Structure formats: structure tokens, C-alpha cells
Amino acid sequence: MLIFIENTPRAYAWGSTEALPDMLGTAPTGEPQAELWLGTHPGSPAHVAKATPVQHTLIDLVESDPERYGVDGGPLPFLLKVLAIGAPLSLQVHPNREQAAAGFAAEERAGVPRDARERNYCDPTHKPELLVALTEVTALSGFRDLAHAREDLLLLAAAARELGRAAGAAGFERAACRLVGRDAGELRRDFLTWVFSREAAISDALACLSEVLAAAESGVLGFWERALEEGAVDPDRLAALRALAAAHPGDPGVLVSLLLHLVRLAPGEAIYLGAGQIHAYLSGVAVEVMASSDNVLRAGLTQKHVDIGELCRIVDTGELADPRFTAERLGHGVLAWRPAVPEFQLVRARVREAEAEAGSGYAASEAATRVDLPAHAPVVLVVTAGKVRIERSDAQPAEVVSARRGQSLYVSAGEPICITGHGEVFLATVGVGER
């Protein structure tokens, strides 16, 4: 079955006020709209669109016939989202399968209410996730070489000294010194613990950071201008620091950000976030797919619960060589991102009408006049550009729908689907890893 689904965007403070209304064709409310959830996660299950006067969710649909509509007789193991990132998200880490199960069981035994602010584990499931940019997306993702973080901290220290902020300069220097010697993984874990210790040096550094960044932007620091010309200062890193310091003044997570890769994704580029990989999204619009879980351990840049001890226990402190995740080309107009997890994979299909010279924002050479895709398991899809026709001609009876940008469908397992028209579609389904 081809079933239209819909949902109300979640209004987190970091959301954009315009991006999701623009995609969905709705009027902006003036409030931030951050995430559109398309799946069976109980936190915000998608609804069957215009089915009956009584509202039905995808959970209701699956429970009505689990073998027909679910996966292995249960809910969908993946959750598809559209993200509209108007301000930086929290620095965060997700547990692996064993950590999630153990943490959830321990908090259940301790009687911690599931909606308690201090709860770390909302469910017993891991939460790998993959993000594909629709617009340019900036993100912090994975640990980089400690030497680069030390260099940035020492540049901030020099700037603070030139401004006469001796205490702040000493704070930055103290932070840089903590990244020297011993095992790199231990240094990163110790740094995370230290920046949340409320030590005076940290407060001093954070107190003068905005002044340092403002002075650097205004060009009053001669050595900083020379450093920019010589490539010692990354303008993108500087812009990210400004955004973080403005959104979260005095938050230790701003210093943690210097340990991480700063990634600028062009539309169509992706990052994959496995267990323990520290990350934060900073800006942009993207499609994201993940295991259907809400387990998050935070390391600053948030007003929510931060448990640094637990985060340091599960974080992967190894250096990440390259945050980007490469797609596989399945055929003309079709890319797939397939991490080695059983819960999900993500496919992008681009189609164009035969006489068209260009697609919706992309070259005609990137689009096919027809895309055929299997649907061995349920599929959730969202149209991100143009208008497409989705057909199951082998079904009895045959099924066909027309969907425009912003509309979403649930596709039950069964015969392949054919996509034509003029637009772009992202499709989530179960993964290729062992189940």
C-alpha cells in the first residue's frame, strides 16, 4: 500500500522559523520548527493523512497487522527526519547497543521516571544516525588531531594577552597544556571532565572569549590578521566559535568544540554517526535517518541534563580520520548511504521528465527519467524537491500516487515501486547489516 503520512514539526529552540514551513507549504508560525519525524517512534509517531475522521498513527497501522505493516512483526526500526537547524544543537554522544540496554535497565531498577530531566537512557536501543545535507550544513563531528586544538587555544591565548586579558590568556594556555603528553584518548577524556569542573581558569577563558572573537572580527589584532593571511586561523572555525559563544555564552562546550572536526557539507554530502562519536549540528537543512531511539548523552551547548561522567564512560575518544560518509551509486539518478547497521539505509532518487534539461536545483545528468526500487521491507519516503509519481504497477490492484515537495508516504513491503516525474525523493528502509 502507498499511504500518505504527515506530522507536526517539533518546536525545539534550535529550529529554523522558515525552513520547514517552506518545505511543507505551510505558513510560518514565528516559532522555531526543528524536526519533522516520519516513523513509529512513540515520542512523535507520524499520522496517516486524511484516512478517517478519527486520527490514526503509523503505530496504529502497524499494530492492526504487524506482519503486513511492521518489520519482523514489530514497529519500524528506523526513524526518518527532516532537520531545520537554525541554531547549534547540543554536543552529544549516543550509546552502543550494549550500553543502551544496560543503562536503561539500571535506571529502570533505580526507579528513575522515564520523563525525568536527569534520565540518560529513554529506551534500551542504540542510536546510530546518518545525515544528508539538503542545503549547506555545518557540523562538529568526531575528534581531530590534538595538535590542531592546541594551536587554536594558543592563538586565543595570544589574542587575550594582546587585549590585556591576562586571566583569560592563562585560561586558554592552561587548556592547551592539558592536551600535551600521555595517550591522546586519555587526554580527550580528561579534558572533557576538566572543562566541566568549574575551575577558575575555565571561567576566565570563557569570560573573555566573546571579546577576543569580536576583536578578531574587527581587525584590531595585528598578529591575528597575519595569522589569517598565513592560514594559521581557519575562518570557518572562527565563525563557528562566534556562533557557539553567542548562542551559549560561558558554556564549557564551546571549548570542547575545538577538539572536534568542523565539517561543511555541500548538498548531497553525508556524515554517519556511530556509537560514541561526539557531534553537534550547527546550521542548515538536512534529511536524517537513525535507529528508532532517543538515547542522548550531552556535553554542553544545552540547557538540558548534562552527565559528563556517563558521557566520558561511553564516548569514543579515538581520532576520526574523515567525518564524511560516501554514497554508493545504485544506478542513474540513484544514490544510497548504507552503513553496516541492520536498522536503516537511505536512498536518494532524482527523476526528470524526458524533455527537461534540468531537475529541481540539479543537473539533468544527475536525474533519470524513471527509477525502479525494491520494497522488500516497509519504506518511508519524503519528497524534497519538485513533484513525482510513485507507482506499483505489479500490485493487485495497481497503485499510483502523485506527491509534491514536502509530502511523505509509508510504503508497505511488497512489489517494487517506480518513481517518475520531476523531483527528488529520499527513501528510508531497513539496513544491509545483520539482523
Image: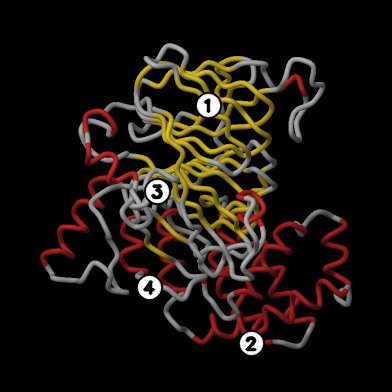
Q: Residue furthest left?
A: 109
- The quadrant the C terminus occupies is top left
Q: Decide if residue 25 is on the left or right side of residue 125.
A: right
Q: Earlier in the sequence, mark 1 or mark 4?
A: 4
- Viewer-proximal residue, 320 or 90? 90
Q: Decide if residue 229 is on the left or right side of residue 378.
A: right
Picture coordinates of residue 121 (x, y %)? 27, 60
* CA distance for labels 2 and 1: 51 Å
Residue 56 badge: none
Q: Earlier in the sequence, mark 2 or mark 4?
A: 2
- Viewer-proximal residue, 353 or 240? 353
Q: State whether residue 304 appears in this view.
A: yes
* CA distance for labels 1 and 4: 35 Å
The quadrant holding residue 72 is top left
Picture coordinates of residue 48 (x, y %)? 40, 44
Tell me the residue that label 4 is attached to. Answer: 305
Does residue 369 sit above or below 342 in this rendering?
above
Label 3 SS: strand
Q: Earlier in the sequence, mark 3 or mark 4?
A: 3
Residue displayed at 70% across by 22% down: 352
Q: Earlier in the sequence, mark 3 or mark 1?
A: 3
Tell me the residue that label 3 is attached to. Answer: 47
Tell me the residue that label 2 is attached to. Answer: 167
Q: Decide if residue 154 is on the left or right side of residue 60.
A: right
